[in-house]
Image (cartoon, rainbow, N blue to C red):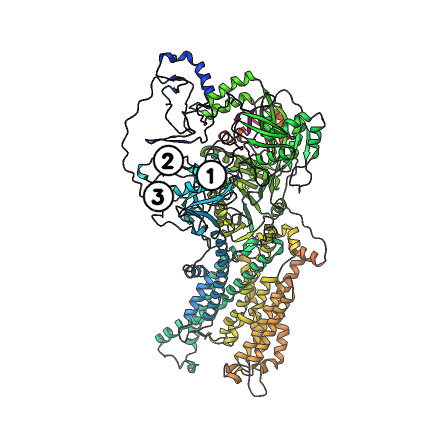
Amino acid sequence: MDEQRPPSIVSEDMFYSDDGSVMEDPSVSVFTEENKIDFRAESALVAVQPGLAAALNEESSSKRPSQEQHPAVEKNAPMAPVAVEVAIEMDAPDSMKRLVGVTSDYQPLSEPPPEEPAIPESPYSPSPHNRLIFINKTESQKFCSNEISTAKYNLFTFLPKFLFEQFRKYANIFFLFIALMQQIPNVSPTGRYTTAVPLMLILSVSAIKEIIEDIKRHRADGNVNNRLVAVHRNGKWMDVRWKDVLVGDIVKVDDGAYFPADLILLSSSEPQAMCYIETSNLDGETNLKLRQGSPATSSIVTGEKLTELRGMVECEPPNRFLYEFVGNIRIGSNISAKRAVPLGPDQILLRGACLKNTSWIYGLVIYTGHQSKLMLNSTTTPLKRSNVEKMTNKQILLLFLLLVLLSLVCAVANHIWVLSNEDAHWYLFFHVKWEYGDLVRTNFGYNLLTFIILYNNLIPISLQVTLEMVKFVQAIFINWDQDMYYERTKTHANARTSNLNEELGQIKFLFSDKTGTLTQNIMRFSKCSIAGIIYGNNEESKEKFNDDRVLKNLQSEHETAPIISDFLMLLAVCHTVVPQIDENTGEIHYLASSPDEAALVKAAKEMKHVFTTRTPDYVVVDMLGQPAKYLILNVLEFTSKRKRMSVIVRTPDNRILLLCKGADNVIYERLGSDKTYTEETLSHLEQFASVGLRTLCLAKTEISEEFYKEWSNTFYKASTAIQDREQKLEEVAELIEKDLQLLGATAIEDRLQDGVPETIDILSKADIKIWVLTGDKQETAINIGYSCKLLNHSMDLVIINENSLDTTRDALVRHKAQFGEMLGKENYVGLIIDGQSLKYALTCDCKQDFLDIALSCRAVICCRVSPLQKAELVELVKVSQNAITLAIGDGANDVGMIQAAHVGVGISGEEGLQAACASDYSIAQFRFLQKLLLVHGAWSYSRVCKLILYCFYKNICLYVIQFWFQLSNGYSGQILFERWTLGLYNVIFTAAPPIAMGLFDRFCSAETMMKNPILYKDSQTGNLFNVVTFWVWITNAIFHAIVLFWMTVATLRYDVAFPDGKVGDYLFLGNFVYTYVVITVSFKAGLEIVAWTWLTHLAIWGSIVCWFMFLVVYSHVYELIGFSAEMTGMDRYVLSCSLFWFGLLLIPFTALLRDIVWKVIRREFFKTHRQSVQELEKAHKEIKIESTLRKKLRPISERARLLSRNLMNLGDRIVGGRRTQTSASGDTAHDSLSEVPIHIVSRENIHYDGFAFSQEEHGAVNQAEYIRAYDTRQAKPQGF
């Protein structure tokens, strides 16, 4: 049935032809043979249908001469605005007839406007700085490849970058220096290759590890680079890998696919070349964004037209600004003669974004690979070092100074000894000159180098190779952990680097993205309140809304049936959703830019109110099997300022209704005198919000024909206003959005990733400060904060929403003052700040104030932040605080903060891999972070700290003995131990205990660690490895060296004679000492190890057995191969000596006695949480340690207070636990409910807990235009 279009249906951006039909494209290009004129929807012209034009002509007839006075003017001649606008009339194709422009003042055109003389157009000469792209032609210049790489190395950069990274470690520089000095003849007492060979081994092992880890990165990059996309080349379509896509290619991207490069949108399956994209991978926003192609290319929807397409795009050079783009397109073979059509951000589709709710698009590639905006916002993979490694480097410097000091002391002492003994012991100096000056010059320099080489192993060369091996295997343990395996995507955890394992055990600040990291970006209609009754699922596992009582009450003439009917009708009509019917299955799918609206419409469908058809004029809803047509008269769009959306419809029974949905406080302020169900709905809203559901209130009102006609005229004038149009439209909306009748409320669940609330709760108890950084809206972010237990309703909130530097500074200073003496301490407070305020807060004069407030809060949520701001925040905390930071995200917009943090964790899964490729560790779900930190992190930190300390201990224990030996040999540089025995100390005899310690030791089980997050604080505070701890171990090693050497010397103070007439020499003493050292350091490892396994036993006892076996075998090597004659028969001399066995029992025990006593005292009188847990575990008792974090447990019902105040029209402002009321005199009185006073800056900044709604604002096409453009009765083009 043809229905007349209601005269009130006016859109500021719509064009109609003279016959009243809606034109297909709001941006119309009219071509004639002589010229081309563009009509943009954004222009000031507003075109209306002839009926309305006629009505306006009648209304203004008194202001203009009659048509008879102007015979040249035809009937229904176009009206032109006086001195403001010009209406243009010209011949056009059949589908595009004469366009009509109108404003509030009109006069007829007495004669056609005179033609202006043609201005000769100068030859087109593009700027040399711009990029020129020719369509369907071979590229005229070489552009960047579309292949991307997030790996650290390639074939050419591996060697220089690897060597640079390795020689950033002071130990490696030192050993390189020692290896070079050993090549000087007659200097090294330990041989020429005893340092060079181990150093080469260390570098080789490190190189192999780096290569293996970087191969993983290259494979991840390959997964992206080898994706396929359809490309149009040489007149045909072909599947091409992403890395082979070229600038100038035309690609086809299908629904749900990612854009392979930065594209110019040419055309799409949707009307007027529109398409929806999801940019959560770029900016974190959950709502879809609308893009619209240029009218010059919107009609190119077939392969034939695409093949014939010729033209050129001129655009700016590549830059990193995501929301800026300037360019022109010229269509036709003779480019210089064609007029340029402008291109802007609304026509660009960025790499990393995903096509949604659009069957296909054609796009022209303009920026590729590392020149795409996404990659320009990324940074090169940084070379990260752990905090433990940095501290170790500093201690190595101090040890090097100690080494030089010992060498100088020994060289000077040798010089003094020589001068004192050259006469008495002349036979010792036959190899040097007797002249005093020559003697000094010959011996002092050589001796200094000799002692440096002798003591070089005070810095353990074995440490680096042992650390590399242990960390590599620790990373394998992480990869193999089945508790971090995600079955649905078949994804394991992946340690992409092993250098930062111990950092995982020290995390103090956790920066998390929201969309895709904490949430699934899936909205589910969970519950609703209709006429004071709650409906919904109790089971969280329900995927669909399924409460039979709704339809039962509706169909059984229940007293609430009319309200239920209106409620469901509103869900099915008041939205911007477009239905799409699957041709194969006949199923209806809904295309929505707002995930909230999609959930609402789907819920209505599940309750037998099925939205089936949308046309420019009306929608059709199948209500309980009966189709009903609702004419769409007006759409009052949703904005974040209005916090509501309304549609005015004409019902099938010819009534005019206003249907409104929005934030609870906004709806309650506009209710009429009928307050039925308001109190019950308030209570239900509180219940919904308390579990983190996103709430909306639904209301309606009936409008009389007379009022609507009057309001429609007012609305029309506001919509055509030249100045302050948006403000005037809001004022007009206020006139009709009043006297509403409350129908009920909806509660939508923003589905969290599995286990997110529990994980955040556990990590908070581990004293990890969690900051959520998201590009999403404030309301959405806060709702997620509540649902994931980052925020709760007993927590005060500081909310900062400012729009200038001065107001931001004032707000920060005011809030900082309100904290008072609690500033800098941990308070049970949450900070909410938006991106605009954050931009000013991160300036130099505000940065410290912002940081002081943020660090005083338990939780921080930053919303509407850009990728750069995320990285800046992480860097700010990283630099200003002596704490380890971790950033976790899943999108390309998170790469910056992932790389800025000490540790970056990427979420790997079904979609974008950009974050995972740039991360240090990747996991499939946020909940796996709990085990990654509390178990693997804490274990790795404890293991690595013990390993480092133990390696320094065992080396100093042996090599300081060399210093004591110099006291007995005239500081000659003679070594006490046989050369190869000394060389194998770190390689064989003490190599296994630190490896066992670094791989298998644990202070308690994984289950206990997960249940008692407070245990994480032991590693978080860094008490296991700091300057004091390090030097305590060094001092202990020196003490052990004193005991082991001097007690052995005392034992052998009298020479030992053997039956063959030989007596003990210095090697005899050396083997005694060496044996006691091996046993002592092995038992010391046993004292430090907590978890004993068969491998631990094998490492400790096996080390001792290895030494004895070596002693026996090495004592007979000379007889076989003529090597090391001085060791011949040493096993027989040593093992047959009773003093050896006496010392074996006494000396190691004496050395370790202090360690044993101190360990007992600590466990008895200074017991830690960790030691208590160990004892409970051994006793097989239940272990539960409560967190000592102070909490303010006071139940608050902010929503009930707030909304009840709104009902009473009072001016109180409440957030968290503080109420602020302004008196008549302007003073502010406070009713303090907490220790920390929290004040809200202005009424606009008040957070209404529970409300959240995602909808793009100020897009390429506004919401009203968008829904007017669709006619779902017509088939869409299929493309090629």
**Residue 59 placed where, x, y %?**
45, 14
**Residue 155 placed where, x, y %?**
42, 60
**Residue 1137 placed where, x, y %?**
61, 81
Q: How crowded is mark 1: few (under 14 residues within 10 Å), some or many (20 or more)?
A: many
Between discs 2 and 1, the one toward the N terminus: 1
Q: What element carries label 3?
A: strand
* Front position in the image: 818 or 1052: 818
* Residue 1198 circle label: none
Q: In this view, does 121 lie to the left or right of 756?
A: left
Q: Give me the C-alpha separation between circle 1 and circle 3.
A: 23 Å
Asked if residue 1154 is among those painted magenta in the image, a careful observer would answer no
Task: Say which amino acid is labelled 3.
Answer: Leu
Q: Give me the C-alpha separation between circle 2 and circle 3.
A: 14 Å
Q: Residue at x 49, y 63 (%)?
A: 206
Residue identifier under label 1: 268
Between discs 1 and 3, the one toward the N terminus: 3
Residue range highlighted in magenta: 634-650
> Where 894 falls versus 443 (above or below)?
above
> Where 582 falls versus 977 (above or below)?
above
Q: Give me the C-alpha separation between circle 2 and circle 1.
A: 18 Å
Answer with the quarter of the image where residue 434 lies. Answer: bottom left
* Front position in the image: 1010 or 285: 285
* Residue 132 circle label: 3
Between discs 2 and 3, the one toward the N terminus: 3
Q: What element carries label 2?
A: strand
* Front position in the image: 106 or 1015: 106
Q: Is residue 537 left or right of residue 1065?
A: right
Task: Say which amino acid is labelled 1.
Answer: Ser
Task: Say which amino acid is labelled 2.
Answer: Val
How many numbered callouts?
Answer: 3
Residue identifier under label 2: 341
Q: How crowded is mark 3: few (under 14 residues within 10 Å), some or many (20 or more)?
A: many
